[in-house]
Image (tube, rainbow, N blue to C red):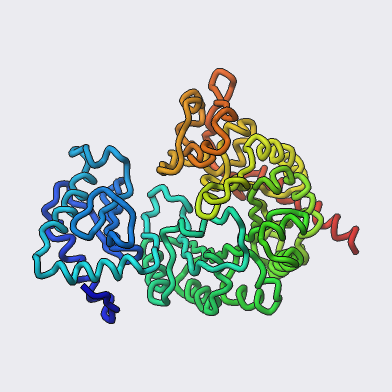
Amino acid sequence: MTDIVLQNRKGERNKWSGILLRGVEGWEMTPESSKVMIGGGVIAVFTREDRQLVVELAHKDEGKDGYQTIDNCVVRYNGADTLRHDPSNPEYHWLQEICANVHAMDPSERDSWESYLKWASRQPKRAFIQRDDKRVTHGQELLIRLLEPCQAKCSFCSCRDAQPDMVSSAEDIEERLVEGVEAGYRRVVFTGGEPTLVKTLPSLLRRAKELGYEKIGLQTNGIKIAHKPYAQELVESGLNYVLQSFHSHRAEVHESIYEIEGCFDQCVQSVRNLMDLGVNVGLNYVATARNATGHVDFIHFVEHTFARPKPLQYFFRGPFPNVTFSAMAPQGWGEQNTQDLAKLTDVAQSIRDSLDYAQARGIQVRIPGLCGFPPCFLPDHLQYFDEIRESEALELDSRVHVQQCDECAFRPRCSGYWKGYFDTHGTEEFIPARVQDGHALPTHGRPSHRDPGWWMFHVRGWKNAMSIQRKNA
């Protein structure tokens, strides 16, 4: 067998899709939709009502062990371990039929199938489009991961060898954007690696705007956006939201995490440029052993460094950047740098001390789901946790619940925590929030502009921002 370079990508994909999905109409509980995509292997996605199965077929030389190995094809799937043993599940039959179709390939097809599979396994991995009513890790945003390289070398970066959705070619990006619109997405976020290293980023933002995306965002380290003309170009192309990494109010700590000398001033200027241009800005502070107790000082820094200018022009944008308090995860590079894993008890205490101050100053704070930490560490501050407002918990193989979780009132909506954290720090810190102690899941969602409390919070922030501007005048 020899490796191949495909010229007719679409035609080849259609050919093998037909073979892999042969007899799909006759399957028990036929899926409402079935789709085959390429990236990190051949990816088949089946959907029926509230059920979804993702099957990955990869060449054994390029992939890990899986559910079955058929000749040189490793079959893996995204689903519960019990799926393979439960014929009452439609997913069980979909999985078995895929395997059967690989087994049943004509001998004359096997060499070309193996060549195609090896080629597909070497293509950049990519995420599949999920329907709006499906629980996904990035909510209702279409996430497009553009490029793996990044100037920063953060020891906890989860984008290193851990993301299944990298795209690189213009064809793939265009396909993702169009598929997203067709699937009902109206928000798109470009991330990486570092998306500002992609020279065509302004044109991608313009294309998203042309297709009708209303929220067009960027996740970035902020370094290139310190150049005001470049920031202006991105905004004029359609950019209206940025989540920028910002890991300390102290230059030496932030720069030690990025491993870039002098980058602190660039990151400060980036935020100021974006605030001046009317962009909604979020700052993502990831807690590690180096900055585990700096949250109060960071809020003070945000308050006195990033008050938005032009208060009347951008009144509805918010007076300050909002802040996301995340925790290092033992994923990607974090899996290799567990010495930087801060103890959650230290992180939670530092965040607890900062929340009342942020509330009083009109600075919005959130704690994300998978990137945050369990709500049982701050059971009296549930309003800040994204995960606790979901209808159900996300299940991942790399996250587990410990014995104490069975007694916790938050268990139905909590995804547990990383296995790698327990391997490093154990489970003694985890104390369940029991119903008998007065803890319960909230029944309301995130405050909106229709909530009078939201308006009071917003006005309080602007009042404080203008006070700071008068002092600096």
From what the image shows, is residue 465 above or below residue 398?
below
Q: Residue extending furthest bottom?
A: 7
Q: Is residue 389 visible?
A: no
For residue 129, what is the image quadrant?
bottom left
Give the position of the N terminus as an image quadrant: bottom left
For residue 198, what is the image quadrant?
bottom right
Count of marks placed on residues: 0
From what the image shows, is residue 426 above or below residue 465?
above
* Residue 248 horizontal side relative to residue 233, left or right: right
Question: Where residue 137 sits in the image (x, y, percent)?
Answer: 46, 50
From what the image shows, is residue 225 above or below residue 394?
below
Q: Residue at x 58, y 70 (%)?
A: 239
Q: Residue at x 59, y 48 (%)?
A: 328
Question: Where residue 54 sits in the image (x, y, percent)?
Answer: 30, 53
Q: Residue at x 21, y 65 (%)?
A: 17
Query: Which one is in front, 418 or 184?
Result: 418
Query: Which one is in front, 166 or 451?
Result: 166
* Residue 397 horizontal side relative to residue 347, left or right: left
* Residue 360 horizontal side relative to residue 236, left or right: right
Give the position of the C terminus as an image quadrant: bottom right
For residue 429, what is the image quadrant?
top right
Question: Where residue 325 sits in the image (x, y, percent)?
Answer: 64, 47
Question: Where residue 101 sits in the image (x, y, percent)?
Answer: 14, 57
Q: Residue at x 36, y 65 (%)?
A: 182
* Residue 163 horizontal side relative to residue 372, left or right: left
Query: Which one is in front, 347 or 231?
Result: 347
Q: Is residue 366 visible?
A: yes
